Image (cartoon, grey):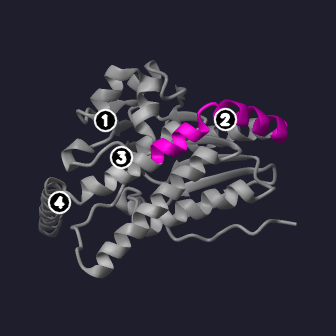
Amino acid sequence: MIPSIPLLETLEITLTSTGVAELAFNRPNRYNALSPLAYRDWLSAIQWAAKCDAVKVVVLTGRGKYYTSGQELQEPDFSAAGIEAQKKRRQVTKTLVDELINFPKLLIAGVNGNAIGFGVTTLALCDVVYSVPGATFNTPFMKLAFCAEGCSSILFPRIMGPSKANEMLLMGRTFTAEELVDCGFVSRLLPLDGFREQILNIAEEAAKFSATAIGVSKKLIRDVDRELLLKVNAVEMEQLTKQMASEESITSLKRFVEEAKKKKALRQNKSSKI
């Protein structure tokens, strides 16, 4: 019997007969930006994959030129409805990170293009990360007066070393895929041509292994610091909520949104003259 696969608006799911589930961010025209719906879809997909017996290995990737450009930033809404929506969004985000921490199956990230923000931090929660050459990775949290998220405050220094992690998290430096291979954040680079097929082939090979053995081994690996990661996620989300409500963050966010509108208008103006 073929299991029911969720039909989601912002994320495409495919499942092979051998048990490889591909979860692909599917807003290529928006650089796979993470809208509130996209966060909910991602959470639904991860929860489905964790529970579906037919799924042995999961590949997380994106459609188009970007892996994901991170959270879709909008001007703050301080109405009662807006505040409630932000509260729900933070809860979805926290739950999603918790689910990634607790995910019981092999989780492979196939970074098909540039990654920003939450798209970068959550890579550290995947079991293996592959990337195309030339992809860039950036967490512009300080520019927006945000803070570390997705357990990056503990996992980035552990994986990359404190100095490189602080360059990314505290100074907003953009890293290349090649640099992240050198520091162990990315396992290896795979050619852009046929990248998706290569990732799925790797996943197919892993799906031939004992799912029980993979699950037991992953539990042994993760159990060492599972409780710590769950605690870190809770603290990070608490601090992020405070930061996003601060005057400096609101000012920075408004400036970002205004600049984005100007750039969009400029592009449209140029297009209309062609």
Q: How many marks?
A: 4
Badge 4 density bin: few <14, some 14–19, many ≥20, Cα 10 Å: some
Left or right: residue 87 compared with residue 233: left
Q: Residue at x 23, y 60 (%)?
A: 245
Q: Residues within 10 Å of mark 1 (few under 14, many from 20)?
A: many
Q: Which residue is mark 1?
A: 169
Q: Are marks 2 and 1 in contact (CB under 8 Å)?
A: no
What is the chief secondary structure element of the magenta stretch? helix
Query: Which of marks 3 and 4 precedes in the sequence?
Result: 3
Q: Which mark is residue 117?
A: 3
Q: What stretch of residues is rendered in magenta?
A: 208-233
Query: Gap in Å between the C-alphas at discs 1 and 4?
Result: 19 Å
Q: Are marks 3 and 1 in contact (CB under 8 Å)?
A: no
In this figure, which residue is indicated by the disc labeled 4? 250
Residue 214 covered by magenta stretch: yes
Whichever of labels 4 and 2 marks the residue nearer the N terminus, that label is 2
Three-letter amino acid code of the residue under disc 4 = Ile
Pick the residue in front: 159 or 246.
Answer: 246
Tell me what residue is drawn at x 40 percent, y 52 percent: 237
Above or below 41: residue 244? above
Q: Amino acid at mark 2?
A: Asp
Residue indicated by mark 2: 223
Residue 260 pos. (x, y %): 18, 60
- Determine whether the residue tagged by mark 4 lies in a helix, strand or loop: helix
Earlier-in-chain disc, 2 versus 1: 1
How far from the left and from the top, in percent, is residue 120?
42, 42
| Residue 46 as seen in the image, left or right of residue 83 | right
Residue appearing at x 12%, y 58% in the figure = 251
Q: In the image, residue 246 lies at what x, y percent? A: 19, 57
177 sits to left or right of 239: right
